[in-house]
């Protein structure tokens, strides 16, 4: 004799839980797994966007290095600090616009500021990088006159 029917129900529950998981346990496990998956996917999307922006900034810095060298030489070649120039360039599918200008400093006309701005649009965002440096015009050498010591 096994006992009362009440005991049979308890015994059958024990064997059921020993054989597998209940529906509630499965739903809780799936909920935890889905929350973890959403967190991981959001982190991957953020990393991808950061990598994309870093790639653009790398292209901008490479272009800025060569363009700044060109802009710095311009006042030295023409002996004039005031200029303005602009244009665009592409790096892969991305298009960039640049604007460069030079101007003399108010406190010393032999010194000038050379500035470069690069702008680009990506998705819904717009980005800008600024670069600047100082340039000095070469001092004119005075030739000593006859009889003067240099």
Image: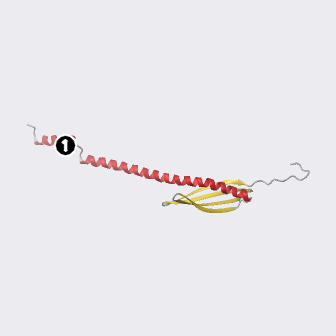
- Residue behind mark 1: 16
Residue sitting at the far right: 147
Q: Nearer the viewer, residue 32 or 43?
A: 43
The chosen color scheme is secondary structure
In this rendering, the answer to whether 16 lies above or below 102 is above
Q: Is mark 1 on a helix, strand or loop?
A: helix
Q: Position of residue 122 (x, y in %)?
A: 50, 59
Q: Where is residue 142 in the image (x, y as percent from the top left)?
A: 83, 53
In this rendering, the answer to whether 116 lies above or below 17 is below
Q: Nearer the viewer, residue 16 or 57?
A: 57
Q: Is disc 1 surrounded by few (<14), some (14 to 19) or many (20+) residues within 10 Å?
A: few
**Left or right for 117, reference 37:** right
Q: Position of residue 86 (x, y in %)?
A: 62, 62
Question: Which residue sits at x=13%, y=41%?
Answer: 8
Q: Which of 38 and 98 is in front in this view?
A: 98
In the picture, residue 88 is in which quadrant?
A: bottom right
Question: Which residue sits at x=70%, y=61%?
Answer: 82
Q: Is residue 99 visible?
A: yes
Q: Where is residue 101 in the image (x, y as percent from the top left)?
A: 66, 60
């Amino acid at each position: 004799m096994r006992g009362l029917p009440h005991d049979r129900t308890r015994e059958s529950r024990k064997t059921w839980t020993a054989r597998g998981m209940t529906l509630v346990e499965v739903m809780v496990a799936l909920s935890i797994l889905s929350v973890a998956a959403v967190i991981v996917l959001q982190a991957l999307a953020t990393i991808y966007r950061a990598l994309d922006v870093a790639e653009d900034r790398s292209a901008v810095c490479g272009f800025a290095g060569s363009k700044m060298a060109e802009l710095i030489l311009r006042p030295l070649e023409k002996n004039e600090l005031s200029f303005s120039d602009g244009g665009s360039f592409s790096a892969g599918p991305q298009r960039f616009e640049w604007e460069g200008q030079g101007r003399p400093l108010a406190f010393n006309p032999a010194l000038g500021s050379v500035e470069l701005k690069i702008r680009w649009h990506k998705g819904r965002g717009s980005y800008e990088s600024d670069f600047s440096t100082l340039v000095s015009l070469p001092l004119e050498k005075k030739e000593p006159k006859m009889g003067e010591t240099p």
